[in-house]
Image (cartoon, rainbow, N blue to C red):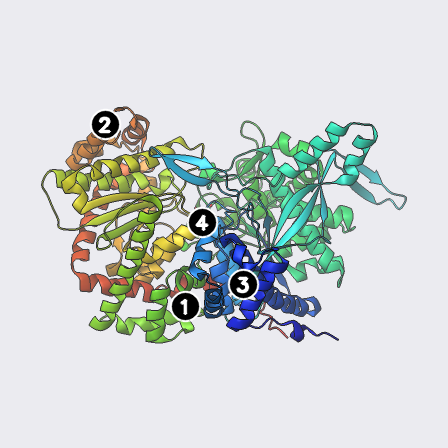
């Protein structure tokens, strides 16, 4: 008999080389002499995948017989990044792979570079989901991430004449070697139609939903290996295909086109990711996507559960986490499945939901809180809307008991919003159903309780908690910053990769001149590499000895890239006026704008305008550069963090829920200039106020300014440097031939300034002067840089996931057999 162990792939270079050539032959039908770079990439990826599958099968076998509870992570987005390098790191295969390929005359680095990442997310929220999957596996926690397999992920960003231009992301065009399609699993998902209410011969009332349209969901699985453990979990992404049985009637009456049209429409469901960052699109297709994937996920959980346990064990077996409100339809869908399909009564079903569902909120911005028009939801999900109404009725009874006669409060709390057109408020639905509701940083969780969910926090204070975000040190240090990794590991051993608090051992080296020297050399080398890559790829130039000042994130007014630009313009203006503080700076931007977000796109245009004007000025360009790196994604992010000296975290206080880029920069030794917003607050607490450049109004002061009537133009009168910067924009210096180009941006700043850019300008620019001074005292700067890394242990996603596991999910690690 063949046993699993007999199949175990061997990891030495010779075995791996044989496997690669075998994959070339038998998967790709190529012999080495004619194999392209993509062929070699795929062959290596398949060989690596075999090793991942081997681990995965062992995990699945353990889970299959176990009695543990698993995490079901529901997220509409996962930004997992390129897989090859990360898999080699986890499997400890880098050296063998390098040698195996070298023997074939192929360069590993070239194949890693070749890989195109699946951009199945917009930004922080999707990347957080990916970091969490990594930590779940690393901590041996059984978990499945469910999501959508978009055929086109987030658009690729080109820059033409300084403008963002979007290109479709055809990430699947060269094949995706990392996924496994599961042909044996499929679930049907209904839309539209009507509901029959029947009372059977035993007097039992039942509802039966007769959908008008049926779509099939099929899963594609991607392994998620844990680091330093054999545990391997998986991500299950659902893809929509047409339901043949349904199409058949149309065929029978000869309506070929109707049948085909139906098929095309079904398959459109998972075609494309909505490219909005923290602001919902309100489109029917988006609602369909949300329902589609949670329905598939829950049906899949029930399928697995019923193989071994009765339906009543659902909540004991699964902890269902809603990553923002995008998967909130899981609440009525689970109710429907339990009641209509599996015969539970309302109370029993609600008890199951309440014991397994928890909700993470990721934003306070009112415009970003999801609501769906009631008529749309009624038409698309007639049974679910009945269930939502019943949940709401019972919930409002509870509110009336606590606050009798307080109709205003009841209206505020209702799941159905009655202002103007009726809406379903997804955050309320998620909150009412969840045993825990958490924000993503201490400040955010506090503001959540004080503002958007205040009434709920008064009703159920015990349900509210905080879990500050974290990032995986595997991808964002060990993989992306190998030189720093070696330096740290030489100094303190490699335990920090799995236990990031161990970075604290670096503190004792912070004053050591020799260590500082090496630390600085690593940063410098990383900058040189980035500079070479930028020059080669985009012809963009910067001086690696300059202070590398970086703001990399989605472009949004609340994140205030335009505040950063006003500073750049002020520096340019100073240089032109003959003031020189002796600091050479490169100010780097990277990030995508939502395609319909005009102001964000104009900010990108301004960044290019400023960059061009500086470049054209011989004196200025020696001191100052503005560089916009196109197409920010996980792959480019991995190049930027290791090279950064200064991390820009300058959102209006109270607006950024947490931020996670801030953590990635800190871990890689960048110092932060930032407001007291999101996780910046905790980063500053950890690294120490003297190693953090704080500026700006606090969240409370921001609220107060707005309450008392904020008038931005008074700052123009008070601050000459500010008014000159604004004048330079309107002068046309940054838009030759079109003076009015930035008028919408400038008018908005001067007259409305909803994000208090002008109010924070002086404080920001003065603090940037402190940055410049600190930079010139190299030893002090390097010491701060070391301490930033050393004290950032808290920001590991392993810490976040341990907190979720203990306080929210009540799940235990499972050791593999
Ligand atoms: C984003 C916040 C970030 C936060 C990430 C991850 C949404 C809705 N929110 O501040 O803007 O870091 O979520 O929690 O995308």
The disc label shown at residue 732, or none = 2
Is residue 331 something one can see in this rendering? no
> Which badge, 3 or 1, comes first in the chain's sequence?
3
Residue 128 location (% of width, % of height) = 48, 54
Q: Residue at x 46, y 57 (%)?
A: 112
> Which badge, 4 or 2, comes first in the chain's sequence?
4
The disc label shown at residue 136, or none = 3
Q: CA distance from mark 4 to mark 2?
A: 35 Å
Q: Are marks 4 and 2 in contact (CB under 8 Å)?
A: no
Which residue has dot 4 on it? 124
Q: CA distance from mark 3 to mark 1?
A: 15 Å
Q: Are marks 1 and 4 in contact (CB under 8 Å)?
A: no
Is the distance from the Cβ of mark 4 to the nearest ligand 1 atom less than 8 Å?
Answer: yes
> Which badge, 1 or 4, comes first in the chain's sequence?
4
Q: CA distance from mark 2 to mark 1?
A: 49 Å
> Which badge, 4 or 3, comes first in the chain's sequence?
4
Q: Secondary structure at mark 3?
A: helix
Query: In the visual, does 491 lie left or right of 397?
Result: left
The disc label shown at residue 500, or none = 1
- Front of the two marks 2 and 1: 2
Q: Are marks 4 and 3 in contact (CB under 8 Å)?
A: no
Nearest the camera: 255 or 452? Answer: 255
> Which badge, 2 or 3, comes first in the chain's sequence?
3
Q: Are marks 2 and 1 in contact (CB under 8 Å)?
A: no
């Amino acid at each position: 008999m063949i046993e699993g162990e007999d199949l175990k792939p061997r990891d030495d270079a010779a075995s791996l080389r044989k496997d690669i050539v075998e994959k070339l032959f038998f998967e790709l039908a190529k012999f080495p002499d004619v194999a392209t770079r993509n062929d070699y990439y795929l062959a290596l990826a398949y060989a690596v995948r075999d090793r991942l599958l081997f681990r995965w099968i062992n995990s699945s076998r353990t889970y299959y017989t176990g009695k543990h509870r698993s995490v079901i992570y529901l997220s509409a987005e996962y930004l997992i990044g390129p897989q090859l390098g990360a898999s080699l790191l986890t499997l400890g295969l880098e050296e063998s792979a390098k040698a195996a390929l070298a023997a074939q005359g192929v360069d590993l680095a070239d194949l890693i570079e070749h890989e195109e990442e699946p951009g199945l997310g917009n930004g922080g929220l999707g990347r957080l989901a990916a970091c969490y999957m990594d930590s779940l596996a690393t901590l041996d926690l059984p978990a499945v991430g469910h999501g959508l397999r978009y055929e086109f992920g987030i658009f690729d960003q080109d820059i033409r004449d300084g403008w963002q231009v979007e290109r479709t992301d055809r990430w699947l065009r060269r094949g995706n070697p990392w996924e496994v399609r599961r042909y044996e699993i499929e679930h049907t998902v209904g839309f539209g139609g009507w509901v029959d209410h029947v009372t059977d011969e035993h007097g039992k009332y039942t509802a039966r939903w007769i959908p008008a349209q049926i779509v099939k969901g099929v899963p594609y699985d991607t392994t998620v290996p844990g680091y330093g453990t054999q545990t391997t979990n998986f991500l299950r992404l659902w893809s929509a295909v047409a339901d043949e049985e349904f199409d058949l009637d149309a065929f029978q009456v000869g309506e070929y086109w109707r049948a085909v049209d139906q098929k095309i429409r079904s398959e459109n469901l998972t075609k494309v990711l909505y490219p909005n960052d923290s602001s919902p699109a309100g489109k029917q297709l988006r609602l369909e996507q949300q329902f589609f994937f949670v329905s598939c996920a829950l049906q899949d959980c029930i399928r697995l559960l019923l193989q071994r346990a009765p339906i009543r064990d659902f909540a004991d077996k699964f902890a269902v986490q809603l990553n923002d409100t995008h998967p909130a339809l899981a609440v009525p869908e689970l109710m429907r499945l339990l009641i209509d399909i599996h015969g539970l009564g309302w109370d029993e079903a609600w008890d199951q939901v309440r014991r397994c569902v928890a909700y993470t909120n990721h934003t306070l911005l009112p415009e970003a809180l999801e609501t769906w028009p009631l008529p749309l939801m009624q038409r698309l999900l007639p049974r679910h809307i009945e269930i939502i109404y019943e949940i709401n009725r019972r919930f409002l009874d509870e509110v009336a008991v606590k606050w009798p006669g307080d109709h205003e409060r009841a209206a505020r709390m209702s799941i159905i919003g009655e202002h103007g057109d009726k809406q379903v408020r997804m955050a309320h639905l998620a909150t009412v159903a969840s045993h825990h509701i958490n924000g993503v940083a201490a400040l955010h969780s506090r503001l959540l309780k004080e503002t958007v969910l205040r009434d709920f926090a008064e009703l159920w204070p015990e349900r509210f908690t905080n879990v500050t975000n974290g990032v995986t040190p595997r991808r964002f240090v060990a993989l992306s910053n190998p030189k720093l990794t070696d330096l740290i590991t030489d100094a303190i051993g490699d335990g920090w990769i799995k236990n990031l608090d161990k970075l604290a051992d670096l503190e004792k080296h912070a004053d050591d001149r020799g260590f500082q020297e090496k630390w600085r050399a690593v940063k410098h080398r990383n900058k040189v590499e980035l500079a070479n890559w930028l020059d080669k790829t985009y012809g963009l130039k910067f001086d690696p000895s300059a202070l590398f000042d970086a703001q990399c994130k989605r472009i949004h007014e609340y994140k205030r890239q335009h505040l950063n630009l006003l500073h750049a313009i002020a520096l340019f203006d100073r240089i032109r006026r003959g003031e020189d503080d002796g600091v050479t700076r490169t100010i780097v931007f990277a990030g995508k704008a939502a395609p319909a977000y005009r102001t964000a796109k104009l900010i990108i245009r301004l960044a290019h305008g400023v960059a061009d004007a500086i470049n054209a000025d011989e004196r200025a360009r020696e001191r100052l550069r503005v560089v916009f790196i196109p197409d920010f994604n996980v792959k480019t992010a991995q190049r930027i963090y290791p090279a950064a000296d200064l991390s820009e975290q300058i959102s209006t206080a109270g607006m950024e829920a947490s931020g996670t880029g801030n953590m990635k920069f800190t871990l890689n030794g960048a110092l932060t200039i930032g407001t007291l917003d999101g996780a910046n607050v905790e980063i500053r607490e950890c690294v120490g106020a003297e190693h953090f450049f704080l500026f700006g109004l606090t969240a409370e002061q921001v609220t107060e300014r707005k309450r008392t009537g904020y008038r931005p133009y008074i700052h123009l009168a008070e601050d000459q440097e500010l008014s000159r910067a604004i004048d330079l924009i309107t002068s046309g210096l940054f838009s030759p031939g079109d003076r009015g180009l930035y008028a919408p941006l400038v008018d908005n700043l001067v007259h409305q300034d909803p994000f208090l850019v002008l109010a924070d300008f002086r404080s920001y620019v003065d603090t940037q002067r402190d940055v410049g001074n600190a930079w010139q005292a190299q030893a002090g700067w390097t010491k701060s840089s070391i301490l930033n890394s050393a004290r950032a242990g808290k920001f590991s996603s392993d810490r976040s996931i341990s907190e979720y596991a203990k306080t929210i999910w009540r799940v235990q690690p499972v050791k593999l057999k």
